[in-house]
């Protein structure tokens, strides 16, 4: 994997820079193997509008002499980041820490699927590189609210449940309504430990949600959003309604 010019990103560990995406390639020498990768403990990397996000990328590898060091790259839509020469902390893995700041490193086009590549050096001089070990999702953070009214409500009467789904913009560092998204209304009866799906509603042109249900029992109402390839899943805080 060829060296690339670092442009301007700092990481918590090692030296990290923004780099141009590269063509897919792999190769190596000797018995060194790259076995897999774990990004952010297996979860999507979710970033809002204000704070930088630091997350670990763990490269699992093997060589009969032990592992020496690794360079790791993240390549995504129109951009990439590079972390140089982290010393491997064990004979089976090398962990890099990346920090991405939405106000310095991102715009909305960067959200989506990213790929992890790494060059691993062994103690005996063997090495291996793979520019697409696996992928992960870099997602814009979301917000979701719920309000049920009237409160209290007479049993058998209509209850109106509203809410708003928003997602972070890395272009202007604000949250905006997420339009035309399917969001599920859930209900948990007082005394129960689990929520049940009631119906699915789509957000309007401003990200707003609105539906009506028949009030039948005391309980908790909430909206839940499954997320998309570019935006995080979110479940709102519940709103308790007293039915009389």
Image: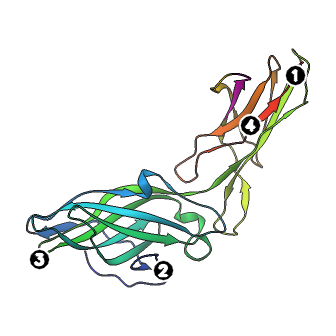
Badge nearest the viewer, 2 or 1: 2
Residue at image mark 2: 10
For the point 87% across and 22% down, the residue is 158
Mark drawn on residue 125? 3
Local packing at callout 4 (Cα closer than 10 Å; few below 14, some 14-19, many 20+) is some
Local packing at callout 1 (Cα closer than 10 Å; few below 14, some 14-19, many 20+) is some
Kindly indicate whether the residue at mark 1 contacts the one at mark 4 (C-beta within 8 angstroms).
Answer: no
Kindly indicate whether the residue at mark 4 contacts the one at mark 2 (C-beta within 8 angstroms).
Answer: no
Residue at image mark 4: 238
**Residue 27 location (% of width, % of height):** 16, 67
Rounded to the nearest whole Å, what is the CA distance between mark 4 and mark 1?
Answer: 18 Å
Residue at image mark 1: 158
Rounded to the nearest whole Å, what is the CA distance between mark 2 and mark 3?
Answer: 29 Å
Q: Going by the image, does 5 lie left or right of 238?
A: left
Badge nearest the viewer, 1 or 3: 3
Instruction: Look at the image and give the residue range highlighted in magenta.
Output: 184-191
For the point 71% across and 22% down, the residue is 191
Secondary element at image label 3: loop
Q: Within the image, what quadrant is residue 163 found in?
A: top right
**Residue 87, placed above or below residue 227:** below
């Amino acid at each position: 994997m060829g060296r690339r010019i670092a442009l301007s990103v700092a990481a918590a560990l090692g030296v990290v820079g923004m780099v141009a995406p590269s063509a897919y390639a792999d190769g190596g020498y000797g018995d060194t193997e790259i076995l897999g990768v774990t990004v952010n403990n297996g979860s999507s990397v979710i970033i809002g509008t204000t704070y930088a996000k630091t997350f670990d990328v763990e490269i699992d590898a093997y060589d009969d002499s032990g592992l020496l060091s690794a360079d790791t790259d993240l390549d995504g839509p129109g951009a990439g980041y590079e972390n140089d020469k982290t010393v491997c902390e064990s004979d089976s893995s090398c962990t890099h820490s990346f920090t991405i700041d939405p106000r310095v490193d991102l715009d909305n086009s960067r959200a989506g699927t990213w790929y992890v590549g790494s060059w691993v050096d062994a103690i005996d001089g063997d090495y291996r590189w793979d520019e697409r070990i696996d992928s992960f999702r870099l997602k814009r953070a979301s917000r979701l609210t719920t309000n049920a009214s009237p409160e209290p409500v007479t049993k058998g009467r209509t209850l109106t449940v509203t809410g708003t789904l928003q997602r972070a913009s890395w272009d202007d560092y604000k949250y905006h309504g997420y339009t035309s998204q399917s969001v599920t209304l859930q209900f948990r009866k007082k005394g129960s430990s689990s929520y049940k799906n009631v119906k699915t509603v789509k957000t309007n042109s401003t990200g707003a949600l609105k539906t009506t249900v028949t009030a039948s029992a005391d309980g908790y109402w909430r909206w839940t959003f499954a997320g998309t390839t570019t935006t995080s899943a979110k479940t709102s805080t519940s709103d308790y309604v007293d039915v009389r």
